[in-house]
Image (cartoon, helix red, strand yellow):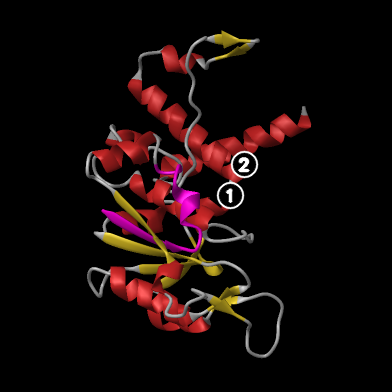
Amino acid sequence: MRFDIITIFPEMFASVFSGGIIKKAREKGLLQVEVHNLRDFTADKHRQVDDRPFGGSEGMVFKPEPIFAAVEKIRRTPRAPTYLLSPQGRKFDDRLARNMARRLQVILICGRYEGVDERVGRLLATDEVSIGDYVLTGGEPAAMVIVDAVARFVPGVVGKKGSVEQDSFSRGLLDFPHYTRPRDFRGMKVPQVLFSGDHRKIAAWRRKKALEKTWLNRPDLLAAAELGPEDKTALDEIRQEEKERKKS
């Protein structure tokens, strides 16, 4: 899989992808990340990529010409998805990450300043994407997040596929709690069920704890999660246990 990132600050990516799992994936040829300086696609001697907005407003706006030129130059096929990173975009999530991982090439346009000329979003970009309901100084951090999240779903990047499938959001729920040595740390003991050797009991405990964590931290996810009769029974137990906990 190949990522092409368009930015006016390519130096920001110099060290980000040179370590960890992303570095190993690049060395194995599983993942390619190319960073392009938007100023290389300008036609004037000042290499200008932005201008004042029509109608009057604060800040500067990215011009459409260099962005169109950049995408048209680096796009390998007309169907390669191109995403404009913007706080106005659809929220990036696990489903979109999986979808991107199935593509041979994904192009990310890092927005900055007051915004990007509207014609980029309407005529060039496949979609606008946001990593959260807040505003960054630019799309570069968002691009780093997206590459990291998507890379995990590229076959071979993560050593154990099962670890990806059980992570938070992969099945519509947050992940269950994890424990390791020591068994007793400052009076906090590892749940006894994890030493039972009964895989069914452990799986049931983990499922209930995933439901509990989701209900407490992200109840909005439960509306879209696929829940069976046992899950609904577990949720009723969790709600009752929480009521009793608050009373005590």
Q: Is residue 145 visible?
A: no
Query: x%, y% of residue 66?
Result: 43, 76
Horizontal side of 239 relative to 110 (left or right) equals right
Q: Residue at the far front: name it.
A: 45
Q: Residues within 10 Å of mark 1 (few under 14, many from 20)?
A: few
* Residue at the image position 40 percent from the left and 43 percent from the top: 17
The residue drawn where x is 33% and y is 57% is 3
Marks 1 and 2 close (CB-CB < 8 Å):
yes
Disc 1 to disc 2, C-alpha distance:
6 Å
**Residue at screen point 39% across, 28% down:** 203
Question: Which residue range is magenta in the image?
Answer: 1-17
User: Per the image, is 10 magenta?
Assistant: yes
Task: Classify 41 as above or below 65.
Answer: above
Q: Which mark is residue 219?
A: 1
Task: Name the foreground residue: 231 vs 206.
Answer: 206
Residue 112 versus residue 145 in the image, above or below: below
Position of residue 201 measured from the top left corner of the image (x, y, whole percent): 40, 23
- Apparent side of residue 160 relative to residue 37 in the rendered image (left or right): left
Q: At 35% across and 34% down in the image, what residue appears? A: 163
The image quarter containing residue 138 is bottom right
The part of the image, by quadrant, that contains residue 189 is top right
